[in-house]
Image (tube, helix red, strand yellow):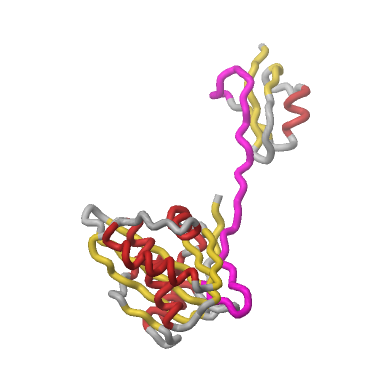
Amino acid sequence: MLINKPFISNGDYGYAVGQCKKGEACEYRHSWGSNGFQELASLPKTLTKVPRKLQIDEVSWFPPPQNFIKINTDGAAKGRSNEASCGGVFRDCNGTILGAFSSFLGNKTSLEAELYGVIKAINIACANQWHCVWLEVDSILTLSMIANNKTDVPITIREEWLKTLQQIQTMNLIYSHIYREGNQVADLLANHVYYNSYVLSSSGGTIGMIRHNFGRVGHEKHSSV
């Protein structure tokens, strides 16, 4: 009795279909059996496209160039009440944490929370005379608003946002997007809701929390599909 069933490999991808007598190692089974092809009785008797391999990329945080301060920020708004918060962390070229903040914002949208994270981070950088800054966020929309000098933001934060855009013009600023998996310190701070406290000391409670969760310098490393 002849059977006509697709074959699939766990170790490769492509097209495979063959006919053979039941139990017989025909040309198809002989050629592909050593590569892990399996007979799939449940699939329809048609040419079957086997899915491509998944590619796994490592998402990592990278330190800034020498003389630069890298700032990672994040914002979050949760629940029906939109209770929002934001957080950020400042690190030097060695990955050393210079400071961090975590702020409760009250009733805000997720966009407002993301923008408030940037506003607070830039204010802190200016107050500490950090003029060479690498700003990294996990929100593409926020990054686009910075890159394009967008002023059409919610009225509740417009004045502060315009001031931030002016401050940015005085800085040597690099900005970039990072996937959430590589922005976990800022995400932790945004969700920690440390009620508007800013820490500029390695002995601070916020930095202690970061080190407890991510190690001495608070580096993120994560693999994602």
Answer with the quarter of the image where residue 14 lies: top right
Residue positioned most to the left: 81
Tell me residue 173's x, y (percent). Answer: 54, 69
Q: Which residues are magenta?
A: 41-70
Disc count in the image?
Answer: 0
The single residue placed furthest to the top in the displayed view is 1
Tell me the residue at 33%/67% (across/down): 160
Residue found 37% across the figure and 65% down from its top = 162
Q: Residue 111, position in %: x, y?
A: 35, 56
In this view, the residue in front, 125 or 49, is 125
Does residue 205 appear to the left or right of 24 in the view shown?
left
- Residue 38 in the image: state x and y as whole percent: 64, 31
**Residue visible at 59% across and 77% down?**
93
Q: Is residue 221 left or right of residue 197?
A: right
The image quadrant where one finds the N terminus is: top right
Q: Quadrant of residue 27?
A: top right
**166, 18: nearer the viewer:** 166
> Residue 12 at what x, y percent from top left?
69, 38
> Residue 42 in magenta?
yes
Queried whether the magenta region covers residue 151, the answer comes back as no
Q: Main secondary structure of the magenta part?
A: loop
